Image (tube, helix red, strand yellow):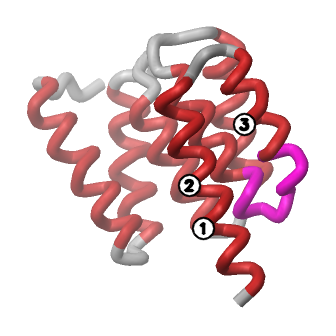
Amino acid sequence: MLDLPQAERSLLARIGFFLCRDGDVPDAADIFSGLSVSAPEKDGPVIGLALCHVLAGQTDEALALLDPRLDAGGGMEEALTLYKLLALAMGGRTAEARALRGEMERKGMSAAVGTADQLLEELAERQVS
């Protein structure tokens, strides 16, 4: 297994997210897969891989990555939950996404709830247009 310093892991992750933004999902997925293999305990690469699946229209695959991490209860619960909400909303499962948003509020994830509201609003506007 490749042991990379955290600074290099962070740089590779940023590159992966930039590739996602630019539509190069396959190369981003390669980066996140490599990062995930090199440190399977870290949630960040899983989030990146889940985003790649979301962008490819593969909601179930994204959820299959995120749900076990959420069930395990790690330090990145808010980020994992936001990406789950994104997967649900972009996969057309709006009612489930809104229910998850309510769960986030009940858990006191106030910063993440604001982001969730913005995301749901933006996606609703795109569907109307």
Report the residue at 12% width, 36% height from top: 8
Q: Are marks 2 and 1 in contact (CB under 8 Å)?
A: yes
For the residue marked with disc 2, what is the amino acid? Gln
Residue at the spot of label 2 = 118
Give the spatial CA distance, label 3 vs label 1. Answer: 15 Å
Tell me where residue 88 appears, x and y as whole percent: 76, 51
Give the spatial CA distance, label 2 vs label 3. Answer: 11 Å
Mark nearer the N terminus (2 vs 3): 3
Mark nearer the N terminus (3 vs 1): 3
Q: Are marks 2 and 3 in contact (CB under 8 Å)?
A: no
In terms of secondary structure, where does tag 1 sit?
A: helix
Q: Nearer the viewer, residue 58 or 104?
A: 104
In terms of secondary structure, where does tag 2 sit?
A: helix
Badge number at residue 101? 3
| Left or right of 47 in this view: 56 | right
Residue at the spot of label 1 = 122
Q: Nearer the viewer, residue 74 or 107?
A: 107
Magenta segment main secondary structure = helix
In terms of secondary structure, where does tag 3 sit?
A: helix
Specify start and end residues of the magenta stretch as a single range: 88-97
Q: Is residue 127 magenta?
A: no
Tell me where residue 56 appears, x and y as whole percent: 62, 68
Tell me where residue 33 appears, x and y as whole percent: 43, 44
Position of residue 8 relative to residue 3, above or below, is: below
Q: Quadrant of residue 4?
A: top left
